[in-house]
Image: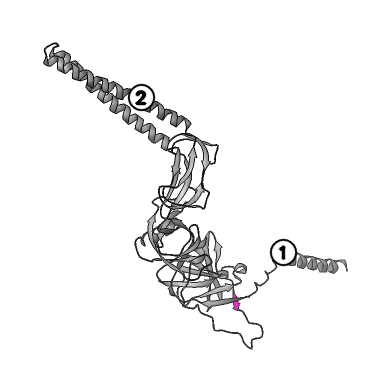
Amino acid sequence: MRTPRLASLSVILLAALLAACSKTPPPEEPVRAVRTMTVQTAPVAGSHEYAAEIRARTESRLAFRVNGKLVKRLVNAGDSVKAGQPLAQIDAQDLRLSQDAAQASLAAARANLEWSEVEFKRYKELREQGFISGAELDRREASLKAARAQADQVRAQAGVQTNQAGYALLSADTAGVITGVDAEPGAVVSAGTPVLRLAHDGPRDVVFSVPEDRVASVRALLGKRDALKVRLWGQEGALGATVREMAAAADPTTRTFLVKADVGAAAAVRLGQTANVTIESPAVDGLIRLPLAAVFEQQGKSTVWTLDRESMTVRARPVQVAGADGNLVVIGGGLQAGERVITAGVHALMPGQRVRLYDEPGSASTPRAIASAEAVPVSTTAIAKR
């Protein structure tokens, strides 16, 4: 009786061990529902928009031509000034003393010159009468020439000192608007140190900066009349502007290039007014527009999921992003017209995963028609603003 019972227990234990050693089959991967769209190429016209400011064509940094202590500032920022109008003044006491000293030296030189002329006339008469030699007359003539040269030198120095005294008053060279104040009364300024900034009346420029990748396209617009569209803050309509000047080197801080465009002298613009500059780009063929949710990053590259209709599986496809327009992405390469791209659920997919088309709630049957991209012009304004 014991032997059959032991045999039965052995069979049970062996079956249990075999069951424990067998692998559990993995659960079947779920078939996810996705939305798709059929891509189509279309001409894409781009535009770039930049923040800008209205500035004067010519802006001067005014400074005194002599050293001194600033005692008066006669204008404030925003004041309109006329040509020759006094703007600021430094203490001129030392300059006046130097001028007086120069005038005294000039008087002494003139007196010496007059004495030398009279003496030379007298010695000339003595030579004619034979009382002195010709060498003595030549020596007196040389003294006269030296006195005349010295008088000319002192006269020039006196003129310089007179001018220096006049430099104590800073005046406007031309009519314009004071745009900045760099020194206040009480400050001791050196010659050439900026005190005021003056924007000259006349033509106005719209000034803005562009990134390095847009330098070539903007430089190609140099001299082309009304190549830019300028929209002033708080005003309707747009003004035409012509690119007049572009910086040869990037700004060391922002690494952008400064652009100046002429809006014309007749344009109704205010100095310092804010504006937006729009640059239209020519249409480019062969570009595709996709929803922003369709693009994700994989191994540092922009990627989309494409759908294989026969096997209903997905594959990762790297793409080149050429721009953006709101919630849409402009694809410049990596896709062909007619391919189907997953537009929803991209972050829950794996390469080779089986999917099914999403059933819209309330629909009578599964829709098989896939929406295609509309062939309409696209603006890349969003990228320019970044």
Residue at 49%, 42% (x, y): give it: 88
Q: Nearer the viewer, residue 82 or 270?
A: 82
Residue 200 rendering spot, x and y as whole percentages: 42, 53
- Left or right of 225? Residue 316 is right
Q: Is residue 361 highlighted in magenta?
A: yes
Question: Above or below — where is 145 with respect to 76?
Answer: above
Secondary structure mostly seen in magenta is loop
Kindly identify which numbered label has been placed on residue 308: none
Secondary structure type for disc 1: helix
Q: Report the Cα–Cα distance between label 2 and label 1.
A: 121 Å
Question: Above or below — where is 375 with respect to 201?
Answer: below
Secondary structure type for disc 2: helix
Residue 168 rendering spot, x and y as whole percentages: 45, 37
Q: Is disc 2 surrounded by few (<14), some (14 to 19) or many (20+) residues within 10 Å?
A: some
Q: Which residue is mark 2?
A: 105
Q: Residue furthest top?
A: 131
Marks 2 & 1, CB-CB < 8 Å contact: no
- The amino acid at mark 1 is Cys
Q: Indicate the quadrant where residue 295 lies.
A: bottom right
Q: Which residue is mark 1?
A: 21
Q: Residue furthest bottom?
A: 364
Q: Nearer the viewer, residue 142 or 31?
A: 142
Question: Above or below — where is 71 with respect to 41?
Answer: above
Q: Nearer the viewer, residue 345 or 200?
A: 200
Q: Which residues are magenta?
A: 354-369
Residue 7 rendering spot, x and y as whole percentages: 81, 67
